[in-house]
Image (cartoon, rainbow, N blue to C red):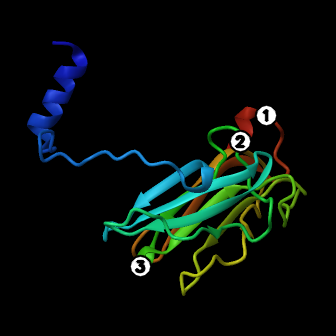
Amino acid sequence: MNLRAIVLFLLCAFSGAACGADAPRVVLLKTPHGGLQPQAVMDGKGVMHLIYFKGEPSAGDLFYVRREPGQERFTDPIRVNSQPGSAIAVGTIRGGQLALGNDGRAHVAWNGSGKALPKNKANRTPMLYTRLNDTGSGFEPQRNLMLMTDVLDGGGTVAADATGNVYVAWHGLGLGSPRGEGNRRV
C-alpha cells in the first residue's frame, strides 16, 4: 500500500469524511462562454456562484453567473467590472476573486489593468472591488481600494462573512516606502 492510499484511508477512517458510496460527487463543468480563470463558491442553499474572465489577458472583463440546484444551465452573465477592460488574466494569481457575504451577496476583488480607473495615489494599477447590488441585477461601480499603498504585487483576495463584514487583502508597498521585496506588506 502506498503512502497516498494510507493517508486517504486514515482521512476516511478518522475524520468522519464520507469516502464510500455516500461521498459527495465531483462534477466537472466547462466555464460558461469560454471564460478563463473561474472562481466558484457554493452557498448554503446549493447555488453555485461563479466569476470568470473574458477578453484580452491584459485588459478584459469579469463576468458573474449562478447555477441553481438541479439546473443544467447558468444564468445569463452579468459584467462585474463597471469599466470595460479593467480586469486582467495575466498570471495565475491576478484574476478575479469571489466571496459570498450576507444573504449570499457576491463580493469580487481583482487586480486592475493598465486601463483601470481610478488609479492608485501613485498613478499606478489599482486593486479593485465591487459587490452585487441589492436587487441582484448588476454590480455596483468598481472602487479602488489602494489608498495607502503604491505598487500592487501579485494577486489579492476577498473574504466576507454572514454579518456583513468584507475583507480585501493584497501585497504591495506603502506609499513612499523604499523599493524592494523586503519592504512589501499585506
Callout 3 environment at 10 Å: few (<14), some (14 to 19), or many (20+)? few
Q: Report x, y in % for residue 33.
A: 60, 55
Q: Which mark is residue 180?
A: 1
Residue 132 lies left or right of residue 13; in this view the side is right
Residue 140 lies left or right of residue 56; in this view the side is left
Mark 2–mark 1 distance (CA, rounded to whole Å): 7 Å
What type is the residue that disc 1 sits on? Gly
Cβ atoms under marks 1 and 3 closer than 8 Å: no
Q: Quadrant of residue 60?
A: bottom right
Q: Which residue is mark 3?
A: 103
What type is the residue that disc 2 sits on? Arg
Extreme-right residue of the structure: 123
Compared to residue 64, the image places residue 12 above or below, namely above
Q: Report x, y in % for residue 72.
A: 39, 62
Q: Quadrant of residue 96?
A: bottom right
What type is the residue that disc 3 sits on? Asp
In the depicted view, which residue is nearer to us: 148 or 9? 9
Q: Report x, y in % for residue 58.
A: 80, 46
Q: Is residue 159 visible?
A: no
Q: Report x, y in % for residue 125.
A: 82, 53
Q: What residue is shown at x 31% (from left), y 66% (from top)?
A: 70
In the depicted view, which residue is nearer to us: 126 or 46? 46
Q: Which residue is mark 2?
A: 184
